[in-house]
Amino acid sequence: MATAGLRLLDAAVAEAVLESCRVLLRGSGFQFQDDWATEGMYAWIAANYALGTLGDDSKDTTGIIELGGASVQVTFVTDKPLPPEFSHTLKFGDVTYNLYSHSFLHLGQNVAYESLHEMLSSPGLKSMATHLLSQAKYRDPCTPRGFSPMEGAVKLPASVLESKVEYRPYAHAVGNFSECRSAARTLLQKGREECIYHECRMGAAFVPDLDGKFLATENFYHTSKFFGLRSKSFLSDLMLAGEKFCHGDWSKIKKEYRSFNDGELLLFCFSSAYILALLHDTLKVPLDDKRIDVVNQIGGMPVDWALGAFVVHKASNLTDMLRPEGVVSPEDDIRHGERPVHHNQGEAMSLARRRWDLVEFLRWGASDRVCKFS
């Protein structure tokens, strides 16, 4: 299975990598199916499987928002009409779930961090080229004051100069949470002018109002844990913690967090501001909202797409697992995610059964599964 890291590649390159894997697996003697479901749907299955809500009323399910390194996934049950490319149907026993699910590529924490610095440094490229400067500073509100980055050569794009000239962009760390959050908000809205739906909250993608309870996983969890916040903490708590960290002095921060290396520490000012920009400014989650629980595990079970894939794999034994409605090519399915997922079990799993399945999942992961997490 491959997630956002592979989707970042050129489509032709990604397909070549996948096809080489298919050829190998088809000849391996193992049971193999060419195509699967979307990453966000599997994460939603994992979350509700761990909570014991699969097979219950759809109103009792929990949505999931994942902040990975390269992408953001949003999946939840909704009764609102959805554009076909965002609508997915999952049947578990007698219950049918109508899901909104979408993966926002390039908006994961690590890729967004790189994109933000590219965006911040870009306005000065043309003037730097004109004056043939070898170095230039740009204002960096997402890094605490006192940090001195190592200088690295970067090539000017061809649009700036016909001959590619090297220069060294130098980030001047100013540590300003509000400015960082504003820059992150701009990044999240990039491409919004291309929206073809009645409302686009993240880029050109449709996102309906968030319904019900949610789990926030991956980098939501890592950031919350770093700041010592409880799983049910408000976004307002994260905002206060982020403001304090961003406005801190880098030398004092390094002394306080000796167990973290510079690369890890550098992300937390940005990640706190980015999470506020994503959840509050973009997805309109109130600062004092209690609907979101920040976790990475439930009852010892990992809340990630790999567990969801295992649940579907185990339930259907790889038969009738993903069935397109009508005649649709696998390529179209993968691109648009327009496939229902069928589960043949009629009632919610017991806790004991789920724990036993977790043991099997860990065995499966150790022997057969190769995963690349976004």
Image (cartoon, helix red, strand yellow):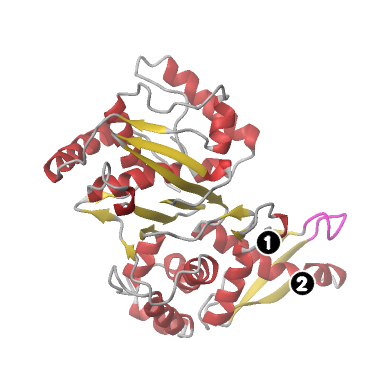
Marks 2 and 1, how far apart at CA:
15 Å
Query: Mostly what secondary structure, the magenta segment?
Result: loop
Please tell me which residue lies in front, 286 or 355.
286
- Can residue 324 be seen here? The reply is yes
Relative height, residue 144 to residue 282 (above, below): below
Measured from the top left, where is residue 114 in percent x and y? 58, 61
Magenta run includes residue 288:
no
Residue type, numbered disc 1: Ala
With 79 as the anchor, is 182 left or right in this view? right
Please tell me which residue lies in front, 93 or 332.
93
| Secondary element type, mark 2 | helix
Quadrant for residue 134, please give it.
Answer: bottom right
With 311 as the anchor, is 358 left or right in this view? left
Magenta run includes residue 161:
yes
| Secondary element type, mark 1 | loop
Q: What residue appears at the point 46 percent right and 65 percent down from the top-left corner?
A: 263
Which residue matches tag 2? 124
**Circle 2 crowding by C-alpha within 10 Å: few under 14, some 14–19, many from 20:** few
Quadrant for residue 292, please give it.
Answer: bottom left
- Can residue 134 be seen here? The reply is no
Which residue matches tag 1? 153
Measured from the top left, where is residue 130 in percent x and y? 87, 70
Q: Which residues are magenta?
A: 157-165
- Discs 2, 1 touching: Cβ within 8 Å: no
Q: What residue appears at the point 35 percent right and 63 percent down from the top-left corner?
A: 221
Please tell me which residue lies in front, 266 or 102.
102
Residue type, numbered disc 2: Gly
Q: What residue appears at the point 57 percent right and 25 percent down from the top-left corner?
A: 328
